[in-house]
Amino acid sequence: MKIIFATQNKGKAKEVKALFENSPFEIISLYDLGNNIDIEENGNSFSENAFIKAKAIYNIYKESVIADDSGLAIEQLDERPGIYSARYAGENCTYEDNNLKVIDELKDFPTPHKAKFISCAVFYDGKNEIEAFGELQGKIINEQRGTNGFGYDPIFIPDGFEQTISELDFDIKNQISHRAQSFNKLKDKLVNSLLG
Ligand code: IMP
């Protein structure tokens, strides 16, 4: 069964395609479709934003869609940047701008800077609305380390590790991440409700 993944984020597309390998579902990204649509995410929660993306793409292709909305919640910053993670340092900012802003905001707080990544993964096919959540607990460090991954990966050390996600192999991130957990749960729900 073909499912479109509604994301413009190459890092996410690579992760989710790998998670659905050897499943009954073939994941087609917006890159595969040559679509670079920019969807306005004006929801108030990860779930609302994920469904906004899924429904916008469903309305174009009338095919089953998965989407995710994700972000970083830092305890000492009252769970910011949260749903504003992508553009935390402003419109058109880079991942590095966001990381430097977080490091600067945390400089006067004691360590460790506890944080978690959150992902809400959703499915929409015109009638079924299915969602699943995942979280990855860890801490923020005050420098960027490593080159793998994307976003806040260079400043985030998952609990149980000494390396940042950017210093870990892709396969390790894709076993422990918030997105791996949300999409693995979503995949199980899809198997049960669509193919069961
Ligand atoms: P979204 O594409 O609207 O869900 O925005 C997600 C933003 O949250 C990304 O642009 C990153 O800044 C951050 N983010 C989400 N997942 C990850 C991850 O796995 N690693 C690092 N940053 C992430």
Image (cartoon, rainbow, N blue to C red):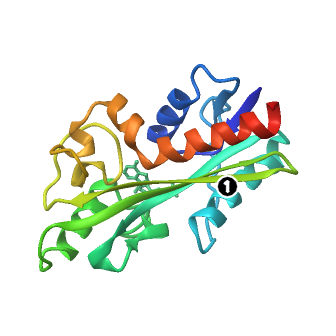
Q: Is residue 90 left or right of residue 111?
A: right
Q: Is residue 35 left or right of residue 115?
A: right
Query: Residue 18, image x and y in percent?
Result: 51, 27
Identify residue type, mark 1.
Lys
Where does label 1 land, which residue? Answer: 53
Which of the 4 quarters of the picture holds residue 142?
A: bottom left
Quadrant placement of the C terminus = top right
Quadrant placement of the N terminus = top right
Closer-to-camera residue (140/148): 140
Q: Residue at x 59, y 28 (%)?
A: 20
**From the viewer's perspective, is residue 39 above or below residue 17?**
below
Residue 35 appearing in the image: no
Q: Residues within 10 Å of mark 1 (few under 14, many from 20)?
A: many
Mark 1 C-beta to ligand 1 under 8 Å: yes
Which of the 4 quarters of the picture holds residue 44?
A: bottom right
Q: Is residue 45 left or right of residue 141?
A: right
Residue 132 appearing in the image: yes
Query: Residue 190, image x and y in percent?
Result: 73, 39
Q: State the count of labels.
A: 1
Closer-to-camera residue (137/63): 137
| Secondary structure beneath label 1 | helix
